[in-house]
Image (cartoon, grey):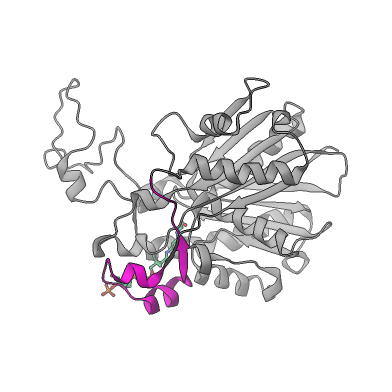
Amino acid sequence: MKRTKIAGIGHYVPEQVIANSELEKLMDTTDEWIQERTGIQERRFGVRHKETTSTMGAEAARKAIEDAGIDKEEIDFIIFATLSPDYFFPGCGVLVQRELGISKTEIGALDIRNQCSGFVYGMSVADQFVRSGMYKKVLLIGAEMHSMGLDFTTRGRNVSVIFGDGAGAVVLQPTEDENQGILVSKLHSDGREAEELAFISPGCHGGYHGEKEKYGFSDNPFDTVFITQQMVDDALIYPNMNGQHVFKFAVKKFPEVIMEVLGEAGYKPADINLLIPHQANLRISQFVQRVLKLNDDQVYNNIQKYGNTTAASIPIALSEAYQLGKVKKGDLVCLAAFGSGFTWGANLLRW
Ligand code: UT7
């Protein structure tokens, strides 16, 4: 049976390091609070107007392509996962195609809007394309430039201290080796929780939450009101999160979906060589580790250095773990994510 393997991997994080102490100067927070509640010590921010989600994604992609030992012209499909695209539209997939200068063919490019689970969803989408024989070398990127859109005042502190910028990428291609590549993927969502972690405006919903007068909406279909001053004043133009609610859901769904992929492939937690949980909060990762009774060397975390990089967190962590020699041929690797939507999922693969 044909499977899909990771043939190359790479990541890029911007050079600019932002320590917790920098945020202390902007809002009512402390290094102690941030470390105790999230494990984060510092994060990276891209250089304004020079780096963007797509340029960082392209940088990670170049490394993944080099690691795969292929020419960029061999790529036959691009998948880009992000919640912080360069533009509202078009998506970052086409921008990376341009940035990489892939010229041979007019290859397809698809953007995935699944926030924290974007990379895990992307792995599954790429897997379907590869196993069906439609594409042979799929470039999957997860990248975020969160720093352009966070509320750096005390009002936004529960969100803005968490997020960082960066990108990770993989090249996926077919393998005839049944004992290698993606074994199982499971994807889930629960749209009832959509607004618990959301970036409401701009959007055609308008973000008025039933308060259309307050936000300046009329019933006139020709009235163009996309963002009003009131939306800006009420912070609807920033990500908002009900942290405790998301936390509770996450610690339930992470173990569930990990057990689901393991169960389908006939494995148990002890068989995992490396679990890469989406780096949302170190406390969440530690909770999952305890529930699944995993040793420290079975879980890889790097949120301490990079914060939460949403769609980029898993490929950055996987790439870093690979470079550190923590992932070896034949290892059973589990990637698991949970986030806005809510959406969550996991991939189980044999390296
Ligand atoms: O990647 C997508 C998925 N996202 C997640 O999985 C995130 C899940 N949630 C979390 O990680 C945590 O809920 C947070 C890190 C966001 C917050 O930690 P918490 O322990 O749940 O804190 P909390 O929201 O319950 O807030 C506790 C207190 C509040 O003050 P009062 O009401 O007790 O006076 C907050 O206002 O901490 C306050 N607070 C802060 N204090 C200092 C919130 N943010 C900060 C801050 N610095 N940055």
Q: Residue at x 40, y 73 (%)?
A: 34
Looking at the rendered image, the quarter that the N terminus falls into is top right
Where are the magenta residues, as a range? 19-48
Name the spot of residue 57 as percent of width and height, x first. 55, 43
User: Is 331 situated left or right of 300 in this image?
Assistant: right
User: Is 153 situated left or right of 316 in this image?
Assistant: left
Name the spot of residue 307 as percent of width and height, x first. 48, 63
Q: Is residue 172 above or below residue 16?
A: above
Which image quarter: residue 244? bottom left
Q: Residue at x 88, y 44 (%)?
A: 177
Q: Nearer the viewer, residue 86 or 328?
A: 86
**Can residue 5 be seen from the camera position used here?**
no
Q: Residue at x 45, y 70 (%)?
A: 38
**Can residue 301 be seen from the camera position used here?**
yes
User: Is 266 situated left or right of 124 in this image?
Assistant: right
Q: Residue at x 66, y 57 (%)?
A: 318
Q: Is residue 96 above or below residue 256?
A: above
Q: Nearer the viewer, residue 156 or 222?
A: 156
Q: Is residue 66 above or below residue 25?
A: above
